Amino acid sequence: MIERIETGERSSKIVKHNGVVYLTGQVAEGDTIQEQVRLCLDKIDALLIKAGSSREHMLRVTIWLADMKDFAGLNEVWNDWVPTGHAPARACGEAKLARAELKVEFIVDAAVI
């Protein structure tokens, strides 16, 4: 069974299938990479809870940076947010994002608790 939560015209914020939660890409506005990362991670926390999961149950995270020069700033916030011993598989690359002011986008898959 597939469950879709907060479904809009183009996407659902959460899709659950076979014990896995798939979150739509999360972006946030802010002046610095650290601010955008913090805001994105707050959104991810809320969506994971709504989906019946948590950051401790993340399986895979794909991170897109508008500029790889922001990699250290991303990791500065990320390293404090990921629970010790629960780091997901992770990929990070550079991509042109949907709007010029965006610096980062996260795509998260997690196990349902």
Image: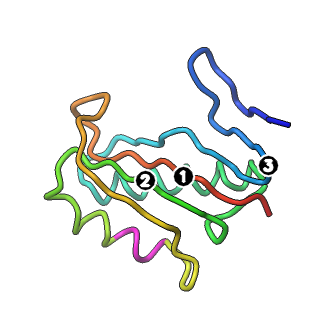
For the N terminus, which image quadrant?
top right
Q: Residue at x 17, y 55 (%)?
A: 68
Find numbered disc 1 in the image and state the secondary structure of the residue it sits on.
strand
Q: Are marks 3 and 2 in contact (CB under 8 Å)?
A: no
Q: Position of residue 56 (x, y in %)?
A: 64, 71
Q: Residue at x 28, y 28 (%)?
A: 99
Q: Residue at x 59, y 44 (%)?
A: 23
Q: Is residue 57 magenta?
A: no
Looking at the picture, which amino acid does disc 3 mark?
Answer: Asn
Q: Residue furthest top?
A: 9
Depth check, mark 3 against mark 1: the one in front is 3
Q: Residue at x 32, y 48 (%)?
A: 64
Looking at the image, residue 15 sits to the left or right of residue 74; the answer is: right
Find numbered disc 2 in the image and state the secondary structure of the residue it sits on.
strand
Mark 3 vs mark 1: which is more N-terminal? Answer: 3
Task: From the image, tell me which residue sits under label 3.
Answer: 18
Task: From the image, tell me which residue sits under label 2.
Answer: 62
Mark 2 closeness class: few <14, some 14–19, many ≥20 residues within 10 Å: some
Magenta-tinted stretch:
77-81
What secondary structure is the stretch in magenta mostly built from? helix
Task: From the image, tell me which residue sits under label 1.
Answer: 108
Q: What whole-number distance in Å separates the C-alpha atoms at marks 3 and 2?
A: 20 Å
Mark 2 vs mark 1: which is more N-terminal? Answer: 2
